[in-house]
Amino acid sequence: MKNNLLNIEKNIEEVLKRSGRTGDKVHIIAVTKTVGVDKINEAIELGLTNIGENRTQELVEKYDIIGNKAKYHMIGHLQTNKVKTIIDKVALVHSLDRLSLAKELDKRAKKHGIIVDTLVQVNVAEEESKFGLKLDEVIPFLEKILKYDSIRVKGLMTIAPFVEDAEEVRWVFKELRRFSEVIKNKDYTNVKMEILSMGMTNDYQVAIEEGSNMIRIGTGIFGQRKYR
């Protein structure tokens, strides 16, 4: 795991250098789906304090054992009826993609007296198998959720189609970056474009070249896993 992380950090440094972004920070979210607590603690010891979970149940179970040694990111599809279980445990929800979820996040955040940080999930490639808003749905969606003052949109997230050659999905990352600039210029209240969460094990280098500052890495850190 240590060697894996060193390789990723070296790659990030090289990509930033050749992209003219030397000194920029790229946050690594360690994707811990099916990863045991011992392994997660080992990752935390190596400095990986942002962990991403796809399932609310797994997030809660790990949170109860690991506690506040890490920041927890909800990176998977979030069911409205599960919001109450994670609202006070997550640093960032990456998968805000519908009004019902925005309403529930706002309601639960108010009950806890907190503001919940979120990313809007965008399905740039419009894959039927993936969640997220289409690009042309994002601005109307943002304008509808401005009234929810316990939600803070920090940026955008996308998952590119899985391909062997990451060059084939460069356009996805380029398009999201371009679109984030369009949103930034609108200067909405409670909407910032500080985070572009894009790039996973197979395509993170291309994503960073196109402006990503948050990558979600599972296999690249923990190796292949069996998903149950």
Image (cartoon, grey):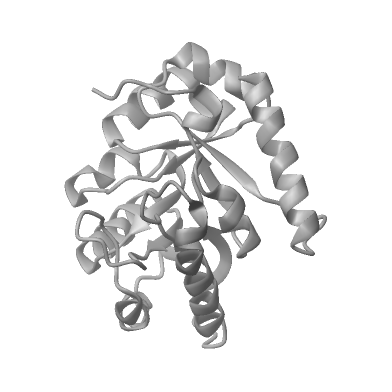
Tell whether 92 sits left or right of 59. right
Q: How many marks?
A: 0
Residue 59 horizontal/vertical position (percent): 36, 31
Q: Nearer the viewer, residue 192 or 40?
A: 40
Residue name at image x 42 percent, y 23 percent: 224
Q: Nearer the viewer, residue 80 or 212?
A: 212
Tell whether 109 sits left or right of 129. right
Tell whether 8 sits left or right of 199. right
Eyeballing the image, is 95 above or below 63? below
Decide if residue 190 is in sight here. no
Q: Quadrant of the C terminus?
A: top left
Residue name at image x 64 percent, y 60 percent: 209
Furthest toward the top, the residue is: 38
Residue 147 horizontal/vertical position (percent): 35, 77
The picture quadrant where one finds residue 169 is bottom left
Residue name at image x 55 percent, y 28 percent: 221
Q: Quadrant of the N terminus?
A: top right
Residue 35 horizontal/vertical position (percent): 41, 21
Residue name at image x 38 percent, y 22 percent: 225
Eyeballing the image, is 20 above or below 112? below
Decide if residue 102 is in sight here. yes
Residue 85 horizontal/vertical position (percent): 28, 38
The picture quadrant where one finds residue 136 is bottom left
Q: Nearer the viewer, residue 167 or 99?
A: 167
